[in-house]
Image: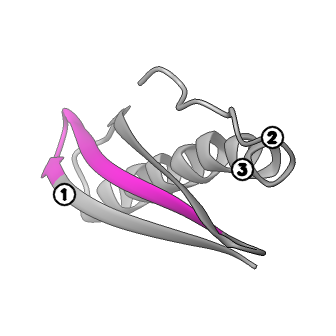
Amino acid sequence: MLRIKVDLQRFDSQPGRGVQQDALWTLRLAEPGGERVLTCGSRISQPAGGSYAEVVAAHRQALATLARRIEPVARAFVVDGATVCPAG
């Protein structure tokens, strides 16, 4: 079973400027005889308008970007123990 843990370490908003999210994410795969673990980090910035709705939308977009970064790494990790973290 693959487990994915995401630790959002930064979740900043600057209305009219942008949002920033820093996350550490860990993939943990249980295997016969033990488990494999890979921990990676991502920093995502997204422009945001001045309203609260635009800031919320920017955070949603940043979270979607994070999910798109994790997904291919998780798929590769299940198949190949030599998977490495992506840049950024």
Name the residue furthest top: 87
Residue found 80% across the figure and 42% down from its top: 76
Pointers 2 and 1 in contact (CB under 8 A)? no
- Disc 2 residue type (three-letter): Asp
- Residue 48 position within the rendered picture, expressed as x and y whole percent measured from the top left: 32, 40
| Residue where numbered disc 3 is placed | 71
In the depicted view, which residue is nearer to us: 79 or 85? 79
- Tell me: 45 left or right of 11: right
- Residue 32 position within the rendered picture, expressed as x and y whole percent measured from the top left: 78, 75
The quarter in which the N terminus is drawn is bottom right
- Tell me: 21 left or right of 87: left
- Which one is earlier in the sequence, the residue at label 2 or at label 1? 1
Q: Nearer the viewer, mark 3 or mark 2?
A: 2
Pointers 1 and 3 in contact (CB under 8 A)? no
Measure the C-alpha gap from mark 3 to mark 2.
14 Å
Are there few (<14), some (14-19), or many (20+) residues within 10 Å of tag 3?
few
Q: Secondary structure at mark 1?
A: strand
Residue 9's tag is 1
Q: Secondary structure at mark 3?
A: helix
In the depicted view, which residue is nearer to us: 82 or 60? 82
